[in-house]
Each structure stands twice: as C-alpha cells, then as structure tokens.
Amino acid sequence: MHGRYSSVSVAAPAFRALTRLAVTAAIIMAAATARSQPTDIRWGTAPVGSTGHKALVVLADLLHREMPELRVSVLPYPGATVKNFALGEIDGYYTSDVALKELESDRGRFKGFKPHVRVQPVQSLWCFTVDVGLAIKAGNRGAIAKWADLEGKPVYTGPLAFDVRSYLEDALAAVGVRHIYKQVDLTTAGSQLSVGSIDAMLIYAAGGQTPPPWLSQASLAVDWAALNPSADEIERLAAQGFGVVEVDPANFHRDLHVRKAILLPSYFGFSLGMKTSADEMYKLLTIVETHADELARVDPSFREIGHGQMPAFEKRALQATWRLAAIHPGLARYMKERGVWESRWDAMIARTP
C-alpha cells in the first residue's frame, strides 16, 4: 500500500508539468489558428450591373489571391454606401467626391444625417473617375439639341441613391434646367427612352472609357445619341466648378451621333476604415499598384491607375477631396514614400480610435 501511494506522489509533479505544457501548447495553437484565420471585410458597393460592382468584384478577386489574410465580401447596395459605413453596417464602401461633399456640407441625400454617424468615413483608395452626361433618342435630335431643351421634360438621371445622379442633377441645376425627374428601373432605361416615357437618360463611363454593363443593355433597346451641353452651358458649368471632358464615341462601342461626347468627371474609389491598420492598408495599396495593369486588363475602369499612374492619380484625387474626410494613415504612408504627399494634408490623417 505504501509503495503504491508513494509512486503516485512521485508522479504527480510530472503529471502537473505535463498538464501545464499541454495547456500552454493549446493556447499557442489557438493563437496561431486565430492568426491564420482571414479577417472578414464587408465591402459595400453599387448594384449588380453598375461600374462600382464590377470593379469591386475584380479588386476582391485580386486581394483574395495576393492578400489572403483578408476575406472580402462584395455587398451590392442601392447606392451611397458611405451611409452604410457611417452607420457601422459595413467595413468598406464605394464612394465619390460627390457623396463626400454632400455629407460634409449636410445637403442632398445626406441632409440631417450627421447626427447618426457612428463611424467617421476615411478615404483610402481612389481608383478612377466616372464621367457622366446625358443621352436622348437619336430620332429626337432635331427637337432636343442642348440641355436647355429638356426644360419641363421627363428625364431619368439615374437611380435615386446613385452618386452620378446627384452630380448630374447638380449640373442641370447649375445651368438652370428645370426638368422632371422620372424614376424607372435601371435595366429598362433604354426601352423607356425608346417608347418616349422619358426624353433623356444618364450615360457615364469610368475614365471616359468604360461604360457600365447596364448601358450596353440599354443600347440594345434604343438608338441613343449623346446630348451635349451647348457652348454657353459648358462655360456656365466650368464657372461653377464642374470639370468638362471630351470623350471619343468609340469608347462606348457605338455611334453616339456626335463627334465627341461632353461628359463631367468625378472621382470614385473603394475605402476601408480604421479597422484596417495602416500596415494592412499600405500593403493593399502596394498590391493594387503592382497589379494595376492586370486590373485594367480585366476591367478597363482601372486604366487611370495603370502604367505607373497610381501615385499621381491618388494625388489628383486628394487635391479635390482632402478637406472632405480623414485620410487613412496607410494611404498617407504610401503617398509620402512615392513623393506625392502635400504637407497641408497632415492634419487630415486619421488617428487610431
């Protein structure tokens, strides 16, 4: 009996030591497993069939391959996803300088929204411009020759939540056109124009070169012509801060019945908030820069950041947007290392909560 109890007393310390080692190993393994699990990113974008949705699908595919520590879910929304981000519903959002201006100035779609903001928007990646304009039925060119001719007529400037709609509405107001906004389904815009339910519809193209998928569908339903603003209207637009660009009709892969389409550009991008660390954001930006030409081959919307143009594009975008929202420290580091940062932006670098 004595010997048996004696052996237990001798074995107990060893057993306790083994137990401690096992617990320690389990903790280490659990920590390693946690580190190996990718971080889920809920990234909001525009509806299926839009420029923003197509572009984020392409970007997410690249990140899944090159940055496996992130797992991106592409979530289509009606538009203005900066609202969903500010409410804490998503981790990343698709936005434009148009939306950030509205939010910052408490107007338009964001009137009265500021008190509801739970997460402050942060700008972290600008990808392309979206150039917006108007189109009419080609057979109506004689009766509708300039924007002013749309006075009192039903016009579809886009879905209510779209940034391009807000921008186009502001542009029409800038030249004093009091049209009637008519809401139709985006997928039926071409047929609505064809039968005369609307007299004009929006058109747009990323970087002036890549129209959205829905516009290709509309082109099957109606022969449409670009409706350019008149020379006087262009002057009035420029005087009120609207950029104006001439776009080759060949970029729309059809006859626009004009020599050049006159469109108005605004900046668009995909931003992540401060849940994404500065190091992670910097890595993401370098991956996008390294693979920008590949992105552009898959989706030409990314052409403006391809061929080594990304640092310069980020600079141009921030020159237009830096006052509107905080700048992600990862973007600040990226731009500083490439010599395109401006010291006046220092105060706008977002701080860790």
Image (tube, rainbow, N blue to C red):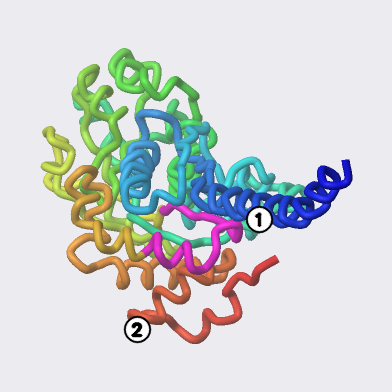
Circle on res. 21: 1
Residue type at mark 1 is Leu
Q: Counting residues from the N terminus, which is met first, the one under dot 2 or under dot 1?
A: 1
Q: Quadrant of residue 105?
A: bottom right
On screen, residue 201 above or below 315: above
- Gap between marks 2 and 1 measured at Cα: 51 Å
Q: Does residue 224 appear in the picture of this structure?
A: yes
Q: Which mark is residue 234?
A: none
In the image, residue 343 sits, relative to residue 323, either above or below, namely: below
Residue 93 shows in this picture:
no
Q: Residue 213 at what x, y percent from top left? A: 28, 31
Q: Secondary structure at mark 1?
A: helix
Q: Secondary structure at mark 2?
A: loop
Name the one closer to the observer, 85 or 249: 85
Rendering coords of residue 212 (x, y %)? 30, 36
Above/below status of 197 relative to 26: above
Q: Which residues are magenta?
A: 269-285
Q: Nearer the viewer, residue 61 or 159?
A: 61
Label 1 Cα neighbours within 10 Å, binned few <14 / some 14-19 / many ≥20 = few
State the residue at coordinates (18%, 38%): 252
Asked whether 271 or 158 is in front, the reply is 271
User: Where does label 2 land, which residue?
Assistant: 339
